[in-house]
Amino acid sequence: MPETVKTEVLYQTSIDDRYPACNLHDGDEKTFWISTGMFPQEVLLKLNCTSANVTKIRTWSYHIKKLVIEKCTEAQPVKFDKIVETELSDKAGAMQIESFAINQTMGPDVKYLKIHIASGWDDFVSMHSIIVEGDITP
């Protein structure tokens, strides 16, 4: 049965000490990671388990236009394969709440996820939460 997969941030392209990327997995929608302007922006997440069969990824954000999520099944985060590519609609100031079902052939043995924000509806974007669900390999 799928469960929430804990993650940790290894890298982010924008750094603002007031809005760190670790806010993505603190469970509080009021905290967030914010970009510092320019695109693309990326966040690299490590799954806190040996690997997982990822079945769903949920995101809460503002002003993201094009979002790509990639997976890595290698021991080190060097080779990534695209598992989500989508253009989000502009919610005119409302939060973008998205849920992406991951195809069974794309989700097994995931060790890392790269969140790639290719463009935004505004100069700055924020991501408030990302929840990864799947079957965990301890």
Image (tube, rainbow, N blue to C red):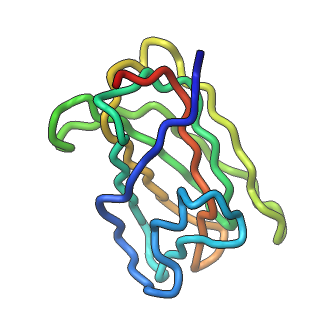
In the rendered image, the quadrant that contains the C terminus is top left
- The quarter holding residue 109 reads top left
**Going by the image, does 71 lie left or right of 65?**
left
In the image, residue 24 sits, relative to residue 133, either above or below, namely below
Quadrant housing residue 16: bottom left
Residue plotted at (32% across, 40% down) = 112
Residue furthest to the front? 138
Quarter of the image with the N terminus is top right
User: Residue 8: x and y, percent?
Assistant: 38, 54
Q: Nearer the viewer, residue 109 or 94?
A: 109
**x, y percentage for residue 125?**
59, 71
Most foreground residue, 91 or 21: 21
Front in this rendered view, residue 68 or 59:
59
Residue sitting at x 59%, y 64%: 127
| Residue under the point 39% across and 60% down | 42
- Residue 107 x %, y %: 43, 22
x and y percentages locating residue 88 in the rendered image? 68, 50
The answer to whether residue 42 is above or below residue 97 is: below
Relative to 120, 112 lies left or right? left
Q: Residue at x 48, y 26 (%)?
A: 54
